[in-house]
Amino acid sequence: MNKYLIPLQVRDALSDPQYQRVDEDELVAEALNRLGVRSELFHSFYQAYSGPFWSIRVGAELLDVIEGPNTVEVDTGICRKKFGLPANFFVLTKYAAGQVVVLDDLSEKIYEMDFEGGVELLSSGTLPVRWTSLASFLIEYFADE
């Protein structure tokens, strides 16, 4: 894990010990391996911090990789089976208001996707990018209100 890949604003926002991941390195590594996410920032973030998280600014619950009934792995699997979410996309947020936030692991771009044609738009490359990188998403997500 390279904690310095995580933007300083995010590290500052999550400096409280309640967010620090403790004694779960193996479980996190197994979950990240099963997911197959290539993003180094994604790996570093989830190895360092334990969620789930909430942001008023973004209005969605950011899932954890091992904590809670809904995880990145579980919800990504559901969206792949039920809606045909392509393999290079990972669900980052809990389903709310008819949509989820997804990461394109190939480009690290972030999309807000609904289930009323959103998968088709995402697959065709016509869904608008909401955040240009995982770093920019995390910075906005954890920005002071």
Image (spheres, rainbow, N blue to C red):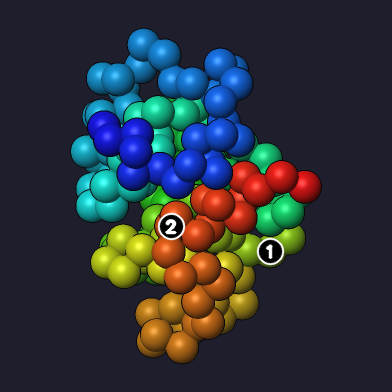
In the rendered structure, the answer to whether residue 1 lies left or right of residue 117 reads left
Q: Disc 2 marks which amino acid?
A: Leu
Q: Residues within 10 Å of mark 2 (few under 14, many from 20)?
A: many
Q: How crowded is mark 1: few (under 14 residues within 10 Å), some or many (20 or more)?
A: few
Up/down of 65 relative to 105, above or below: above
Up/down of 117 relative to 82, above or below: below
- For image coordinates 28% across by 35% down, the residue present is 2
Q: In which quarter of the image is residue 46?
A: top left
- The image shows residue 31 at horizontal and vertical percentages of 30, 33
In the rendered structure, the answer to whether residue 4 lies left or right of residue 60 reads left
| Of marks 1 and 2, the one in the foreground | 2
Residue hosting label 1: 98
- The image shows residue 50 at horizontal and vertical percentages of 49, 27
Of pointers 1 and 2, the one earlier in the residue sequence: 1
- For image coordinates 26% across by 20% down, the residue present is 26
- The image shows residue 25 at horizontal and vertical percentages of 30, 20
Q: Can residue 79 be seen in this view?
A: no
Considering depth in this image, is 131 or 111 the residue closer to the camera?
131
If the image is split into quadrants, where does the N terminus sit? top left
Residue hosting label 2: 134
Q: Report if the CB atoms under discs 1 and 2 are less than 8 Å apart.
A: no
